[in-house]
């Protein structure tokens, strides 16, 4: 079985850990638990008859005091760039984080995850933001880790991209 290292990147509180827990364990917890360093999980997928194991690196969210260490990114085949749809600043941070990540590890496949669609009444990402993603030819998936909506789709999309490069 083909194994690929996948990182979840984004500012603190965007839902990286919740996405992993929803994807791997089909659970959601209301309690916010801040990741310290990195937490690693695995999940096997079947993508169009091809087995693929994702080794998921849930990396602590960036803030003013912490940015992703280059050693965490070493060997990354692809990543999910997670944005909290209710916090516009996380979108802007993701743009910068993607550029810095590409500078460190080169152009590897990634999917931008617009998380927290269950909070549509508080949404801060507008059509112009989505148009910017489309203009950059970024793939993006709307998700709700809480409801499980789009979660499998986001990881499967990245999996397809990884298999296409293998």
Image (tube, rainbow, N blue to C red):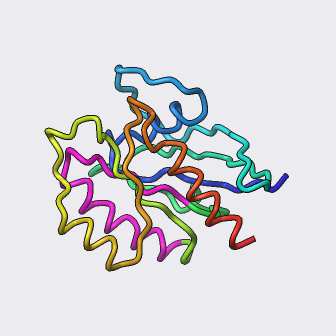
Q: Is residue 105 left or right of residue 1?
A: left
Residue 108 placement: quadrant: bottom right
- Point out residue 150 in the picture as x, y percentages from the top left corner: 45, 44
Residue 41 placement: quadrant: top right
Asked if 158 appears above or below 135 in the picture, the reply is above
Q: Is residue 54 left or right of residue 22?
A: right
Outermost residue toward the front in this view: 48
Give me the residue at 43% from left, 57% from top.
81
Give me the residue at 59% from left, 52% from top.
156
Give me the residue at 57% from left, 60% from top.
73
Give me the residue at 32% from left, 79% from top.
135
Camera-side residue of 146 and 74: 146
Camera-side residue of 128 and 89: 128
Instruction: Count all numbered tags in the image, as a single digit.
Output: 0
| Part of the protein shown in magenta | 79-104
- Point out residue 116 in the picture as x, y percentages from the top left corner: 31, 40
- Point out residue 63 in the picture as x, y percentages from the top left corner: 30, 49
């Amino acid at each position: 079985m083909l194994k690929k290292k996948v990182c979840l990147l984004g500012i603190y509180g965007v839902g990286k850990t919740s996405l992993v827990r929803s994807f791997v364990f089909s659970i959601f917890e209301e309690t916010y638990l801040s990741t310290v360093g990195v937490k690693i999980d695995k999940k096997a997928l079947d993508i169009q008859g091809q087995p693929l194991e994702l080794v998921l690196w849930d990396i602590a969210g960036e803030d003013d005091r912490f940015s992703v260490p280059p050693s965490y990114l070493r060997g990354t085949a692809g990543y999910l760039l997670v944005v909290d749809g209710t916090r516009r600043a996380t979108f802007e941070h993701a743009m910068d984080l993607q550029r810095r990540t590409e500078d460190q590890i080169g152009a590897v496949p990634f999917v931008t995850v617009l998380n927290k669609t269950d909070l549509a009444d508080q949404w801060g990402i507008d059509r112009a933001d989505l148009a910017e993603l489309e203009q950059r030819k970024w793939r993006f998936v709307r998700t709700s880790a809480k409801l499980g909506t789009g979660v499998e789709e986001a990881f499967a999309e990245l999996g397809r991209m990884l298999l296409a490069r293998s």
